Image: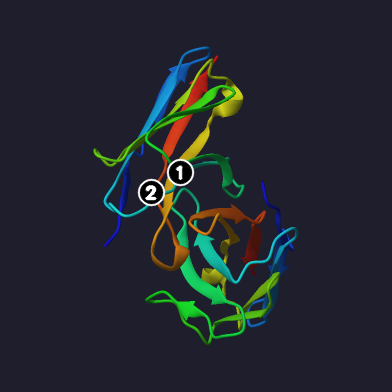
Amino acid sequence: GAVVSQHPSRVICKSGTSVKIECRSLDFQATTMFWYRQFPKQSLMLMATSNEGSKATYEQGVEKDKFLINHASLTLSTLTVTSAHPEDSSFYICSATLIKGGTHAEAFFGQGTRLTVV
Amino acid sequence: QKEVEQNSGPLSVPEGAIASLNCTYSDRVSQSFFWYRQYSGKSPELIMSIYSNGDKEDGRFTAQLNKASQYVSLLIRDSQPSDSATYLCAFPGGSYIPTFGRGTSLIVHP
């Protein structure tokens, strides 16, 4: 399968600071990437769709000014959590979609980033 | 709204048994269906994809798709304790946005 690399895997930051998370598709180009958040024992929650060369599309209830997404190239999307607070502590996961044969879209996930805000 | 329904479980099976995981979906248009495995504290891993009606086998895993009934299942033969995880059913929705079920927790006990 395709490889998606996410960095860092774990970060602890102070309240009020910003944290940047990188998501890279290593062996394919991804015009679209997705960012998810997952709280313990809960489902994946889609936060936003990251579109290469254009603005991200945010899901309802997700603050775009707090969660800044940049998709500068076909292999890299970044999520910046600005002015982080303890309630932002969560597991953040990115995914990139590989289109096969023009019709079948397989989503591959990064390793996830465990964010703890203290 | 396109949806995926899964029993949250937990589904508990003894080691060596067959684990059967089920999923129903609302989107009649989707041509692709996927099963992901997520271990606690880890991100989901794609383990099976299926595009056509019928069965697809890969090692101990068999995915079954019935588009008429809008039903997809995953069978795990000779279940091992290492198979204990949450299994997510998914299909690509509009703009290829993956739509996931809530996942079924599987526990394989020795």
Query: Are the residues at dot 1 and dot 2 in contact (C-beta closer than 8 Å)?
Result: yes
In the drawing, what numbered circle is on residue A7?
A: none
Residue at horizontal 57 percent and vertical 47 percent from the top: B44
What percent of the width, then of the height, locates residue B8? 36, 39
Find disc 1 in the rendering and name its residue: B88
Residue A61 image position (x, y, % from top left): 39, 76
Q: In the displayed structure, would residue A50 be above or below residue B74?
A: below
- Name the residue beneath numbered marker 2: B101
Mark 2 element type: loop
Please state which amino acid type lies under the numbered disc 2: Gly
Dot 1 falls on a residue whose secondary structure is strand
Judge left or right: residue A16 versus residue A107. Answer: right
Which quarter of the rendered picture does the N terminus of chain B lie within? bottom left
Q: Amino acid at mark 1?
A: Leu
Rendered residue at 53%/14% (across/down): B15
Q: Is residue B67 above or below residue A105?
A: above
User: Quadrant of the image for the C terminus of chain B?
Assistant: top right
Q: Residues within 10 Å of mark 2 (few under 14, many from 20)?
A: many
